[in-house]
Image (tube, helix red, strand yellow):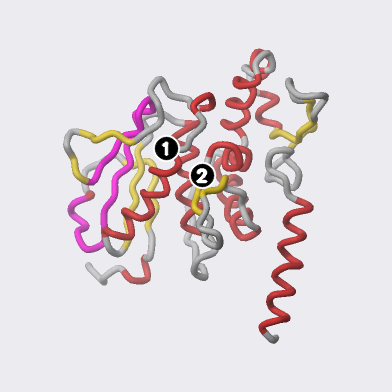
Amino acid sequence: MTTEEILLENERRMSLRRTDYDPVAGVGCLGPRVKVKTPFGRGDEAFVPEAMVRDPQYGEARRSMAAWKRLRCRHDFEYWCATCATIRDKTSGRDVRFILNAPQRRVAAVLEADRTAGRPIRMILLKARQWGGSTLVQLYMAWIQSCRRTNWHSLICAHVKDTSSVIRGMYTKLLADYPPELWEGDERPEFKSFERAQNVRVIAGRGCRVSIGSAERQEAIRGSDYAMAHLSETAFWPDTP
C-alpha cells in the first residue's frame, strides 16, 4: 500500500470508531449492558453494566447525580476512563480524557473477562509500539486502586528504572486531574511518600501503594505484598537464573 492509501484506511477506521463507540452513553462498550434512564438531564439514557444495576446501592445512588456517577465508575471501566482519567494525547500534545482506541478495547475486554469471572488476571502482551498498550494496562490498575480496592498494592517494573518512572508518571497526572466529586477517598487524590521510601508512593485516601523497580535491581522489589504487577519491556530484561 502507498502512504496515501494507508492514511485513507486509517481515517476510515477512525471514523468507524467515532460513530459506533461512546463510553459515556455506553454504546459499543464491553460486557453485558442494560439501557437505563439516567437520574439527571432531560430523559437521557445510557447503556450501563448489568452489575451496576444489580448493585445493592443502585437505588440509593439514583437520588444523586454524583453518587450515580461514582457507582457507575466502580462498575464501568470505560466510563471511568472517559470521565476521570486524563492522559497526554501523543498527536496534539494536549491533555485529554482517556477514550480507548480499538486495540485498547480488545485488551480491556480480556482483562474484564477474567475479572468479572473471578479469575486471576494474567496477560502476556506482545505488541507494536506506541498504540497505548502500557497506558491501558496501567490505567486499568489505577481504576482498580481508585474505585474498587483499598490497601491493594501494585508494582511497576521495567527494564530500567527511568521507564518505570515514566509509567508511574501517567498515574501522577491522573490523580492531579481527577474530578474531586468522583473521588472515592477521604483525602484529595494525590501520591504521598511512604515511610520515606524513595520508590514507593501511597494513594491518599485509598491506602494503595504503587512501587517502581527495574530488572537491573531485582532484589530491591522483594518482600512486598503486591496484588498487581505491570512488567514492561520484558524483552530487554537481562537473563538471570
For residue 195, which numbered disc appears in the image? none
Query: What span is colored magenta in the figure?
Result: 199-220
**Which residue position holds label 2?**
86
Q: Residue furthest bottom?
A: 2
Tell me which residue sits at (23%, 49%) in the image. 221
**Which residue position holds label 1?**
176
Find residue 198 and report its image quarter.
Answer: top left
Quadrant showing the C terminus? bottom left
Instruction: Pick whichever, 8 or 67, lies toward us.
Output: 8
Quadrant showing the N terminus? bottom right
| Position in image of residue 149 (x %, y %) | 45, 31
Tell me which residue sits at (26%, 62%) in the image. 215
Determine contact: label 2, label 1, CB under 8 Å.
yes
User: Does residue 128 sit above or below 47 in this rendering?
Assistant: below
Q: Is residue 170 left or right of residue 164?
A: right
The amino acid type found where label 1 is placed reads: Ala
| Position in image of residue 202 (x %, y %) | 31, 34
Q: Secondary structure at mark 1?
A: helix
Q: Secondary structure at mark 2?
A: strand
